[in-house]
């Protein structure tokens, strides 16, 4: 008996699918409008998720590949007070890179000072990098707006003193009227208590990297910094690039172990504090929070948009059920079970949702692909890019198609559509054959 019931059901389902498909196109204009409404909602959700995913990936790239790297190590006193003397000894540099596989490291030093030209002067932030190691960790040295990046030795001054090249931020160059080839005097408090000063030559202007550096940043070589600051005992910051970012936690654990071993072999002084390791999520908490919230935001936006679009489908199915009430009454009167009627109406809604999903995905992906790799170009209105959350982005908004996001949007639309179809489907179950056939 159970086998016979299963056989009967298996024969009924294909017929119900066929009838449901035919019923959709009884009123083609109404069905096309319904499909258009659902597909439009899905297109909006797909486009929004691609924009969000592209922006988040751009934020992560800007934070890790352009400026901070994946991991940074500082002394606690430098984190708290930017203590100039809270440095790591130079032997730590090669030892960490040698003992921890799969990473590249680059040392950095920082200080504040006064920059002057014949026309103006202003406070600046000095940042020293190793021109050979820095490109293995970030792409900071490739972000040149004008000039040719050179942090080496320029020609000697009239007094025979060596002059080094420096690179300045875009806004600083604008404020001080600097161009490649301009001379810049830097004055600061050196590490030995003397007044450090020197004459430098601007070799290039950087693109905006971050609001602070763009407004105050002067980039120089470590050798130039050591001569200006009289500080050659170590470095303030170790920026680290992990070759396999998927296994960054394992790299962090190895680094912590190696730092402890280094500290035992060559103890750090107490004044500078302990070595503190922080990854890019800790260094850029806003980006990390956005990554955590992005899935929830995508779901909420998708739910609202698709719910609004499903109202059109609900209206379509209510009208269809009302127009076919007489037919349903006859079917019930001749012995058709009500659950089959309910299933047939639900199948009509499912087919409408599937067709809408197919149309929406095809149009959505095609539209996103039309923007190309750069995405939405904003260079016409924001040639210098835009600042968001302490990071300066290139003047374009990338769009990234994540298959998981698209699949989730399609499933969400099908589920909401079927839920909306429960009301008209339930009306077929409650029909009174004698009344509707009267």
Image: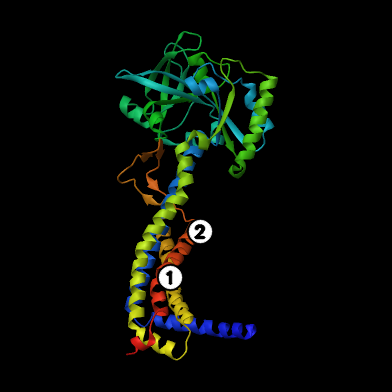
Q: Position of residue 105 (x, y in %)?
A: 59, 31
For the residue pair 79 and 221, the one nearer the viewer reads as: 79
The vertical placement of 365 against 381, above or below, is below
Query: For the N terminus, which image quadrant?
Result: bottom right
Q: CA distance from mark 1 to mark 2?
A: 19 Å
Identified at 48% across, 79% down, the residue is: 339
The vertical placement of 117 against 299, above or below, is above
The numbered disc on residue 147 is: none
Tell me the SS state at disc 1: helix
Q: Position of residue 437 (x, y in %)?
A: 34, 89
Q: Position of residue 196 (x, y in %)?
A: 45, 12
Which of the two labelled residues, at mark 1 and mark 2, occupies the earlier sequence position? 1
For mark 2, what is the residue?
A: 403
- Horizontal relation, residue 261 to residue 70: left or right: right
Q: Position of residue 99 (x, y in %)?
A: 69, 31
The numbered disc on residue 353 is: 1
Identified at 40% across, 41% down, the residue is: 393
């Amino acid at each position: 008996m159970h086998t016979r019931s299963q056989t009967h059901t298996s024969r009924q389902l294909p017929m119900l699918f066929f009838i449901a498909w035919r019923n959709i196109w009884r009123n083609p204009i109404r069905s096309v409008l319904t499909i258009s409404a659902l597909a439009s909602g899905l297109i909006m959700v797909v486009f929004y998720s691609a924009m969000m995913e592209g922006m988040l990936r751009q934020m992560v790239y800007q934070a890790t590949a352009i400026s901070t790297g994946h991991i940074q190590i500082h002394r606690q006193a430098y984190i708290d007070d930017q203590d100039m003397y809270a440095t790591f000894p130079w032997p730590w540099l090669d030892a960490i890179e040698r003992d921890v596989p799969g990473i590249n490291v680059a040392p950095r030093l920082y200080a504040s000072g006064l920059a002057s030209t014949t026309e103006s002067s202003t406070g600046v932030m000095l940042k020293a990098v190793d021109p050979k190691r820095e490109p293995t960790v970030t792409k900071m040295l490739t972000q040149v707006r004008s000039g040719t990046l050179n942090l080496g030795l320029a020609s000697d001054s009239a007094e025979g003193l060596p002059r080094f090249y420096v690179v300045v931020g875009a806004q600083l160059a604008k404020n001080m009227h600097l161009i490649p080839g301009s001379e810049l005097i830097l004055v600061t408090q050196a590490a030995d208590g003397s007044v450090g000063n020197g004459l430098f030559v601007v070799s290039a202007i950087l693109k905006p990297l971050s609001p602070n550096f763009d407004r105050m940043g002067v980039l120089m070589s470590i050798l130039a910094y050591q001569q200006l600051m009289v500080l050659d005992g170590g470095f303030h910051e170790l920026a680290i690039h992990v070759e396999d970012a998927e296994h960054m936690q394992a790299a962090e654990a190895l680094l912590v172990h190696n730092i402890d071993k280094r500290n035992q072999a060559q103890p750090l002084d107490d004044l500078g504090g302990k070595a503190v390791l922080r990854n890019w999520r800790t260094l850029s908490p806003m980006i990390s929070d956005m990554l955590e919230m992005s899935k929830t935001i995508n779901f909420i936006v998708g739910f609202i948009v698709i719910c609004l679009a499903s109202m059109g489908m609900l209206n379509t199915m209510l009208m269809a059920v009302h127009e076919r009430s007489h037919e349903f009454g006859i079917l019930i009167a001749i012995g058709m079970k009500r659950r089959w009627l309910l299933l047939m109406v639900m199948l009509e809604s499912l087919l409408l949702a599937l067709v809408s999903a197919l149309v929406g995905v095809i149009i959505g992906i095609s539209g996103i692909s039309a923007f190309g790799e750069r995405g939405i170009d904003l260079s016409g209105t924001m040639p210098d890019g835009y600042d968001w959350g302490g990071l300066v982005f290139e003047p374009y908004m990338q769009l990234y198609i994540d298959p998981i996001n698209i699949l989730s949007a399609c499933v969400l639309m099908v589920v909401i559509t079927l839920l909306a179809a429960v009301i008209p489907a339930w009306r077929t179950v409650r029909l009174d054959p004698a009344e509707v056939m009267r």
